[in-house]
Amino acid sequence: MSQLIDLFNKTIIVTGAGSGIGRETSQLLADQGATVIMLDINPEGLIETASMCTEHCHPMTIDLTDCNAICEAVHQIVNRFGKLDGLVHCAGISSRKPLNVLNKEGFSKVMDVNFFSFVELVKNCAKKKHINDGASIVVISSISSIKGYKAKSEYCVSKAAVDAFVRCMALELAERKIRVNSVMPAEVLTPLALKAKEMNAVVGAPNFNAPLGPSEPYEIANTIAFLLSDATKTITGTSILIDGGACI
C-alpha cells in the first residue's frame, strides 16, 4: 500500500524559522497542513516568515543557547498545541578562522548554537509527555561534516558532532519508533548565503565544485518534509547529502 507525504494535523517545531532554510521549511510544512511552531532569536524575521505562511504558523522568539529557555519553551508549546510529531533544527551559525586564532571560546560559541542547542531540544522534546511515538526529528547538518575546508574547523567540527549525535539518538529512540536524521547540504542559495558568498569571494571562500551547482532552499525543505512524513517509517540514523555531486 503506497503512502503519500502527508503532514496534516502534525505539530512540528522548526528552529531558525526567521530566515533561509528554516523559513522555507516552515512555509512548506504549514502548506502541507502541519501546525508549525517557529523558533528564532530574531523577532523581525519571525514576523516576516509568519506573514508568508498560513494561519498554521506560530512564531516564538527564543535564544537557543539558553538551556532553561528551551525547557520552558517546549513545555509551553506542548501545553498549548499538544504533543509533538516532529522537530526540525535549522538554526545555526558559521565561522571562518585559521588555526592561529582558534581557541576554546570560539569553538564553544559555534557549538552552542549548532550542536548543544540541538542536544537540549532533543532532550526536552523527546520526553514521553512531550512527543508522540513514531515522531520524526530532523537537523540541518552540512557537507562540512564529512569534508574539510581551510579555516572552517569550528563549523566542520560542530556539524560532525551533530551527525554523530543523530546516529546515537536514532538507536536510543528507536524503541518508540522515533526517527532521527540529518540533511547535509553543500551550497544553498539562501539570501544570507548569497551575501556571504559575495564577501568571501574576496578572501577565498570554500569552493564546493558541485557538478549540478548549488541547491535552492526548497530542495532542502522538500527533503525535510519527506523525512517528517510517514511516507517511510524506517529511515533513521542517516544523513542525506544534497550537494549537487560535490562529494562524488
Image (cartoon, rainbow, N blue to C red):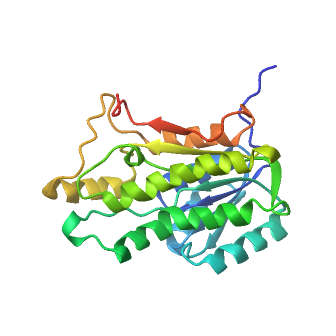
Residue 18 shows in the view = no
Classify residue 130 as left or right of residue 140. right
Residue for point 48% across, 60% down: 19
Quadrant of the rendered structure where residue 69 is? Answer: bottom right
Residue for point 65% across, 64% down: 121
> Is 243 above or below relative to 148?
above
Quadrant of the rendered structure where residue 35 is? Answer: bottom right
Q: How many marks?
A: 0
Quadrant of image for the N terminus: top right
Residue for point 57% across, 53% down: 165
Residue 169 position, x and y percent, is 66, 51
> Is 56 above or below relative to 29?
below
Residue 8 position, x and y percent, is 78, 44
Q: Nearer the viewer, residue 93 or 106?
A: 106
Classify residue 3 as left or right of residue 108. right
Classify residue 115 as left or right of residue 8. left
Quadrant of image for the C terminus: top left
Residue 225 position, x and y percent, is 63, 41
